[in-house]
Image (cartoon, grey):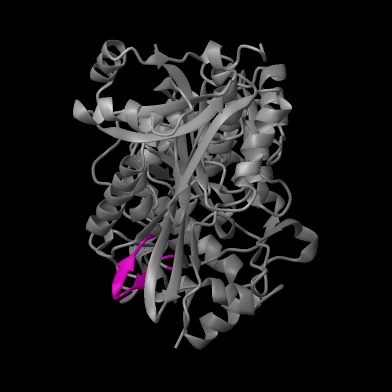
Amino acid sequence: MNQQYWEKELETLSQVDLQILQYERLKKTLRFASQSMYYKKLFAEKKINPDGFKSIKDIEKIPFTTKEDLRSNFPYGFLAAEKREVIRLHSSSGTTGNPTVVYHSKHDIDSWANLVARSLFAVGTRDTDVFQNISGYGLFTGGLGFQYGAERLGALTIPAGAGNSKRQIKLMRDYGTTVIHTIPSYVMHLVDFFREMNLDPRTDTDLRHMVIGAEPHTEETRQRIQAMMGIKAYNSYGLSEMNGPGVAFECEYQNGMHLWEDAFYAEIIDPVTLQHVPEGEIGELVLTSLDRQAMPILRYRTRDLTRFLPGSCPCGRTHRRIDRMKGRSDDMFIIRGCNVFPMQIEKVLMQIPEVGNNYMIQLETIDGVDEMIIEVEVLDGNFLDNYSKLEKLSKIITNEVKNEVLVTPKVKLVQPNHFPPCEGKALRVKDNRKQY
Amino acid sequence: MSIKQLSIFLENKSGRLTEVLETLGQEKINIAAMSIADTSEYGILRLIVSDPEEALRLLKNKGFSVNMTDVIAIETPTYAGAFAEALKHFSDAQVGIEYMYAFELDNNGIIVMRTDDRQKAFKIIESNKLRLVSGNDIFKEKK
């Protein structure tokens, strides 16, 4: 009877009961948080008394926490537990300053693994599956996060790591992998390798479905991935500040990601006014961990832009769904007075069949004018017959992008193997403009 | 009867052409004719090769954007004015030539061309007794 859900009661709790649970867990979380140097000081300064909180809505008395706050209190400012209770840390690479580091107790790791197991279960992964985790291990959370989650679920889990496409394909075929997890941009490279090995992922593997995440991508990209791989690709959302994967996850219906509201309290704000946006409108996702002890983070500004989706989901889960990420409030760039999200450009490109999956947006100052140059891969096609067809393709891309973002780009056609394979998040924008 | 031509999209960047030629050379694929034209950013390389199917597969595996098309090849004598005579038949019949290039084989000139009307082009060739060249003709000694 309990076939559909990993934890039926929690996953189908009514919104009212969920809010009561959130309130209880928030109170606990605040008690833990006040053990950390950062929040102890903040609560004192802002005269916040966690004992006076009457409902989950009182959370709005607490100021937002930003990535900057995490960085400037590096390394232990947010640690809320004794070191003997802490068993693991994950951190960002920190190439541009102090890394963002998150500490976990045994309870935290257990809770996280359970959320990932619940997520994988929701898309149909079972203990009979062979789960190949094509993800960087180590400080990056996609490796160990999915490893522990898939193990908790009971799947045979292959810690394949990132890169080395030929070995990935060999592992898939040797062990009869049925489920993979990877980032969307890597799928494209994987498909190239299948072709090079004269194999077809649709017929020469036992894959049943896949999980993609860690990179914002469009529905069009997902459709392409599904067509190339011949299986469903489920969207996953997470960030290391909130454990990593397992914050929000699609179910079998692929209509938005259920945000696990027993473990996270979500708000969506206007990144400029910092006020809540009306329900259903796009804004910046703000998250509070509700089930973490070693390092609770309160009202964290994720910089990820999304919205709550209206209505209920046919799967029966009551946890609200968020839309796929619409980009980040900080990857938006402004060119010639227009706000542009790289996602808008990707959306346009992916609707043009002659165009490949990789692209690069370069912002340059040419003769004192800011230009947006888009490098686009040309795929095979009969438009190689003559130059006028190639020029026409360039023009179509130029016009479509202009219609979407109101800036006329310079389109540069490049060969399909122009972009080196990437093993981390694909870099889509390079801003080389001169700052005056 | 037409011959297979490969069209390859090339970025205007040093080493790209060499990569194509080396790929074919390593697999002992002969190139009989080649033409390349460029814009400021990219070019289309056109090749007549001994094994077009295999060359297509090899280049696609290397990640190139390649296309195979049918083109017409006709043989002309090598005296001055011979090309003009051959092409005049097409212009008289209002058949447009999208592109063409020429090479020499056994002391004869070979014109490779793509026209905007294949049916009409073949009629012109037939009625004027122009000699069509096949892929086998070009690579006969080498096979």
Is residue A339 highlighted in magenta?
yes
Q: Residue A179: horizontal and vertical position, in percent?
A: 57, 26
Q: Nearer the viewer, residue A362 or B48?
A: B48
Q: Taking A380 as reference, is A421 above or below it?
A: below
Q: Quadrant of the N terminus of chain A?
A: top left
Q: Taking B126 as reference, is B15 above or below it?
A: below
Tell how many labels: 0
Q: Nearer the viewer, residue A279 or B113?
A: B113
Q: Residue A272: horizontal and vertical position, in percent?
A: 33, 75
Q: Nearer the viewer, residue A393 or A218?
A: A393
> Start and end of the magenta stretch?
A330-341
Q: Residue at x 61, y 45 (%)?
A: B16
Taking the image as shown, residue A110 lies to the left or right of residue A435, namely: right
Q: Quadrant of the C terminus of chain A?
A: bottom left
Question: Is residue A118 in sight in this rendering?
Answer: no
Question: Is residue A288 in sight in this rendering?
Answer: yes
Which of the 4 image quadrants contains residue A91? bottom right
Q: Residue at x 52, y 41 (%)?
A: A416
- Find the residue positioned furthest to the front: B79
Taking the image as shown, residue A418 lies to the left or right of residue A22, namely: right
Q: Residue A22: horizontal and vertical position, in percent?
A: 43, 54
